Image (cartoon, rainbow, N blue to C red):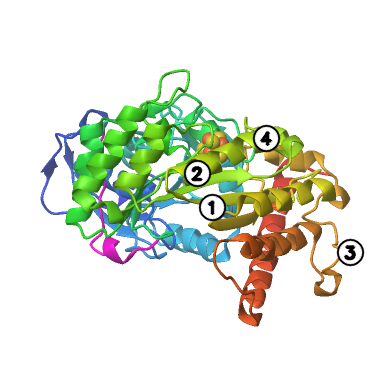
Amino acid sequence: MQGSGRRTVVGKVPVVMEGLYASVIPKIQYMRVTVISPEIHTYGAMLIGGVLRDAGYEVDLKTELAAREATPVLLSLYSTQHLISPAIRHFVAAHRAAGGAVYVGGPVSAAPEIVLGELSPDAVCVGEGEETVLRLLEEGPHEGISGCAWTDKGAMRFTGPAPPAPMHRPLPLIPPDIGSQDIRGASAYIETHRGCIGACTFCQVPRFFGRSVRSRDLGDVLAEVQAFKDAGAKRLSVSGGTGSLYCCSPDGAVNDEVFAALLEGMAAIMGPKNISSPDIRVDCISDTVLDAIRDYTIGWVFFGLESGSNRVLRLMGKGVTAEVAARGVEACREHGLKVAGSFIVGYPTETEEEYEETRDFIAMNSLDDVFVSIAEPIPSTPLADLVLRTPREENPVYMPHTGEYSSLHLTEAEARSFDLQQHADLFKPGLHVVTDEVFSAYLAGVRKDGEDVRRVTELLFSYYGGR
Ligand code: SF4
């Protein structure tokens, strides 16, 4: 199978490329290309759009599944659900039938065999795609391009993940409607660094970007913030779960002065009320970090707390105990910050007693906001391996719930998620009444989460076997 983008030449004026990536493609280019990230303009899609623009391409950046006939498409997919979406599968097949190549990249590329098996694109751009996409568009997939997987005579060919991309790169291609985008309160999430020192077993970040942190130049980040503001972005946030690891030392020690300078610089451009708090690890805070969040953002900290059980936290590879997490929450309060936390329920082997420890943690720490999700086995993570080793009848995502909510016909994981959301409302500051409407919304939400996680689990079983 091949998919050279050369099949479509639509531009009229040759563009001489002088950008950062010009050395990897020819000097004259006429190509139009469509970059699609379903539903939202992701930072990754905007970044790839910027790389292509600077390399001389005419780029259509879209959130809907549509492209001109026969133009090459880069499909940037960020959720495993995209791999089992009939609409995306249909789009890929129809676009290829119309003569356009389709290349898939983004976080889903960590499992190229599933991408190829489910969507049948021309190729998968595996790992950090800034350089690979340019060569794929120009040459189609072949053994000489790293970070590339495709199907040949029914078998997968894979050249291994792309090497880490340079952190100095073009400005993203920012769509004119960026100001109307609202992703958890922000128009966009700015990437300040890649990689994480953590090893959380459910998380793809250290597998995709590595465990050493590579940071961008502060001037580059602030130039980008200015570009987003000029394009109409209303509020920006720092992307990823490790905000304060920006410019950390090789052993992961927080460089709090540089982090504070980052937030101060962003606030000087956008205004502090338009910078939202970065997600951070509870063991990556300091007085300077928390003061900077208070002074230069809307004043919220978001922690991935996950569980109140130390055994489950160990199983998750969080690297912190519930006691350390509680001290982190307390430190935020002492610095005048509000604290939100996310929790994961239904991790394989999580017992009822361990779930109760999570309830107790929430009761004792009165978080200002709480987000609950069911453990989702993202392909390529250790959690996915654990799920594959866990018989369905022992996995809370499948086990029928027989307790308090048995009349609602939930699974154990769904029941815990449903229960924890209502429980958290009781302990948030202020009055939070669980009305019939809220009850129904929580119930519908956990049912959908449970169904989504089971679909991903079945996908894993179908590719890697299971019990
Ligand atoms: S700290 Fe956050 S980004 Fe790092 S591995 Fe854990 S969940 Fe992932």
Residue sitting at the far front = 334
Instruction: Give yes or no for contact between labels 2 and 1 (Cβ–Cβ under 8 Å).
Output: yes
Start and end of the magenta stretch? Answer: 169-182
Q: Which residue is mark 1?
A: 79
Q: How many marks?
A: 4
Using the image as rendered, state which of residue 371 and residue 219 is in the foreground.
371
Q: What distance separates the C-alpha of mark 2 from that of mark 1?
A: 7 Å
Q: Write the residue at 27% across / 63% down.
A: 179
Residue 452 position (above or below residue 123): below
Instruction: Give yes or no for contact between labels 3 and 2 (Cβ–Cβ under 8 Å).
Output: no
For residue 409, side relative to residue 438 (left or right): right
Q: Write the residue at 23% across / 62% down.
A: 176
Residue 46, x across and y down, in percent: 32, 50
Q: Amino acid at mark 4?
A: Pro
**Disc 1 packing (10 Å; few <14; some 14–19; many ≥20):** few
Q: Does label 4 or label 1 sit earlier along the sequence?
A: 1
Q: Which residue is mark 3?
A: 402
Q: Does label 1 or label 3 sit earlier along the sequence?
A: 1
Q: Main secondary structure of the magenta part?
A: loop
Residue 322, x across and y down, in percent: 66, 38
Q: Which residue is mark 4?
A: 382
Q: Does label 2 or label 1 sit earlier along the sequence?
A: 1
For residue 148, side relative to residue 404 (left or right): left
Q: Does mark 2 have its CB less than 8 Å from ligand 1?
A: no
Badge 3 element: loop
Residue depth check, mark 3 versus mark 2: number of the one nearer the observer: 3
Whether residue 225 is in magenta: the answer is no
Residue depth check, mark 4 versus mark 2: number of the one nearer the observer: 4
Q: Does label 4 or label 2 sit earlier along the sequence?
A: 2
